[in-house]
Image (cartoon, rainbow, N blue to C red):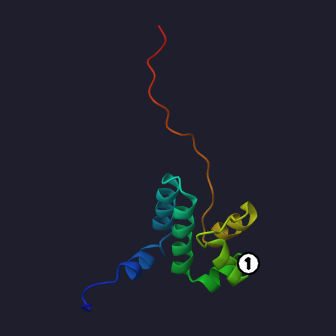
Amino acid sequence: MSKLTKDYRESLLEDLQDPEEAAAYLTAALDESDPAVFLLALRNVADAKGMSTVAAQAQLNRESLYRMLSERGNPQLASLTALLDALGLRLAVTMKCSPITPPAP
């Protein structure tokens, strides 16, 4: 690989250090409706910040954090909230877009 060409993962992790980029990336992953996609995206964001640093800030064991973000991970809400807080992010709930219905006569 040429020195002029950045590795995709390296570039992704660099971009994900920006909280706005990380939030948009995680939102897009949630839109996929596949928990594994979201966990992978969350792991990438945590990797961008430094897994050990994030684990310490979230008061989670680093190994537990890796397990939680694995393909078979199933984080509890408290752990997920702690992780997002350590990343400077939070969960938000919004309404699904509903199809446009004609006004009643």
How far from the left and from the top, in percent, is residue 26?
51, 62
Q: Which residue is mark 1?
A: 60
In the rendered structure, the answer to whether residue 12 lies left or right of residue 86 reads left
Q: Observer-nearest residue: 61 or 70? A: 70
User: What residue sits 69% from the left and 64% below the top?
Assistant: 81
In the rendered structure, the answer to whether residue 5 lies left or right of residue 47 reads left
Amino acid at pointer 1: Leu
Residue found farthest to the top: 105
Q: Observer-nearest residue: 71 or 87? A: 71
Q: Regarding mark 1 in the picture, which secondary structure is present there?
A: loop
Residue found farthest to the front: 72
How far from the left and from the top, in percent, is residue 78?
75, 64
Are there few (<14), some (14-19), or many (20+) residues within 10 Å of tag 1?
some
How far from the left and from the top, in percent, is residue 9?
41, 79
For the N terminus, which image quadrant? bottom left
How far from the left and from the top, in percent, is residue 31?
49, 52
User: What residue sits 71% from the left and 78% below the top?
Assistant: 64
